[in-house]
Amino acid sequence: MTWPTPYVAVIFTTQRSSDLDGYAEMSARMDELARLQPGFLGVDSVSTEDRGITVSYWVDEAASLAWRAVAEHQIAQQIGRERWYDAYDLRVATVTRGHHFDRRQ
Amino acid sequence: MTWPTPYVAVIFTTQRSSDLDGYAEMSARMDELARLQPGFLGVDSVSTEDRGITVSYWVDEAASLAWRAVAEHQIAQQIGRERWYDAYDLRVATVTRGHHFDRRQ
């Protein structure tokens, strides 16, 4: 999926702990909520048992910051730090170029 | 891992085909080569059977472009389009903020 540049990518790379109680449900709920946020463009997410990369795309940084501040999302972030994640990196980036390839097109 | 901002993130999201002949070897070789490139900072990569996200980090856009132009990498890109990937998105972004969390620290 491509959108007009510039837009914002939030790159979230995680190392999960062994305590994933409640994780799957919260993750699905956050995906659902993020999609309702103003300025949400899309999300890519791939994970294995213990590592994950989620990249969410936003029209601008204000939209990404608004999502970060959503109350239910703040609770998820808190539980993430306390329980689900051993470590993570969160990076905010401005996408300046994008190229889409689809062999079927 | 964090580095002084700004730096460049190249976000590569893929849908793989069913023909992965030679893919694993090439992927390992590209990882090895990328690490030798001037301006390489690091890489995060997570994949399942049919989807992947690889984010590589570079000191600046010139460094990321130099990697794109490496002859052996160009061959890998060509085979990727012909064989391994049904679709992909490549995004070049400037990281302006980063936050690292590690529960063990």
Image (spheres, coloured by chain):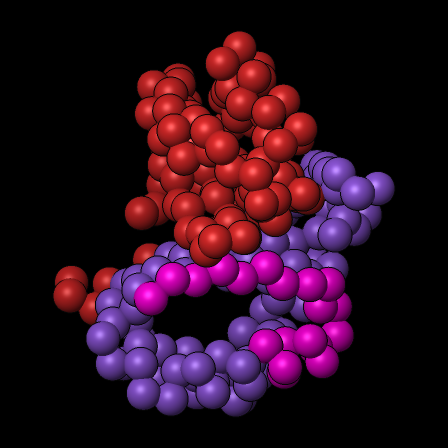
Chain colours: A red, B purple
Whether residue B79 sits left or right of residue B34 in the image: it is: left
- Nearest the eye: B92 or A45: A45
Count of picture labels: 0
In the image, residue B24 above or below residue B3? below
In the image, residue B87 above or below residue A81? below
- Nearest the eye: A67 or A1: A67
- Residue that sits furthest to the top in the current view: A71
Residue A3: quarter of image:
top left
**Which residue sits at x=75%, y=42%?**
B102
- Residue that sits furthest to the right in the current view: B105
Image coordinates of residue A51 in percent, x first then y, are 54, 53
* The magenta segment: B31-49
- Nearest the eye: B23 or A18: A18
Name the quadrant of the C terminus of chain A: bottom left
**Magenta stretch holds residue A31:** no
Determine if residue A31 is in view: no
Image coordinates of residue A94 in percent, x first then y, are 57, 40
Residue B84: quarter of image:
bottom left
**Which residue sits at x=39%, y=82%?**
B23
Whether residue A90 sits left or right of residue A32 in the image: it is: right
**Magenta stretch holds residue B45:** yes
Image coordinates of residue A68 in percent, x first then y, are 56, 21
Residue B76: quarter of image:
bottom left
- Residue that sits furthest to the left in the current view: A104
